[in-house]
Amino acid sequence: MSQSLRILIVDDTLAMRTTVKSMLTNIGYTDLIEAVDGLDAWNKLSTTEPPVGLILCDQNMPECTGIEFLKKLRADPRFAKTPYLMVTSEGDRAFLLEVLRAGAHDIAIKPVTVDILRTKIENVLKKAQS
């Protein structure tokens, strides 16, 4: 797994973005970009070079939710296959199935540990390659 992977962290809560960044740094990832919601993420994703190789996105955010952002990604050929991990506190089965049907590679339910995050990222990157 490439630790030089550029990761976009999307969450409206600064504390959560900081926690996720800390966990990713602990795992060995250092090329990290933050966005406060789906609109901010879309703007950063569209203008970032080299491109983002993995998106970790929350669901409940103002302006543009995680699933709205995911659907926008999947509708754009440039980002249709970008690895996407939904990191959410939403545990409703119907919602989780909708997220997977919309094109997420996997879902991590908060609270997330470093070990869970590492495993989920490995799974997402494997799924995205197949």
Image (cartoon, rainbow, N blue to C red):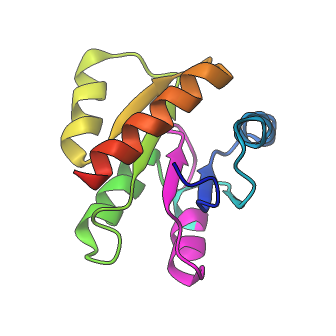
Q: In this view, does 4 lie above or below 9?
A: below
Q: Which portion, as a residue range, is magenta?
A: 40-63
Instruction: Determine which quarter of the picture holds residue 35.
Output: bottom right
Left/right placement of residue 85 relative to residue 102 reads right
The percent position of residue 32, horizontal first and vertical second, equals 71, 58
Q: Does the magenta stretch include residue 130?
A: no
Instruction: Determine which quarter of the picture holds residue 30.
Output: bottom right
Left/right placement of residue 37 relative to residue 84 reads right
Q: Residue at (53%, 72%) from the top-left corner?
A: 45
In the foreground, 23 or 110? 23
The percent position of residue 48, horizontal first and vertical second, equals 60, 79
The percent position of residue 72, horizontal first and vertical second, equals 33, 64
The percent position of residue 7, horizontal first and vertical second, equals 60, 56
Q: Is residue 64 above or below residue 110?
A: below
Instruction: Determine which quarter of the picture holds residue 99.
Output: top left
In the foreground, 117 or 86? 117
Residue 120 in view: yes
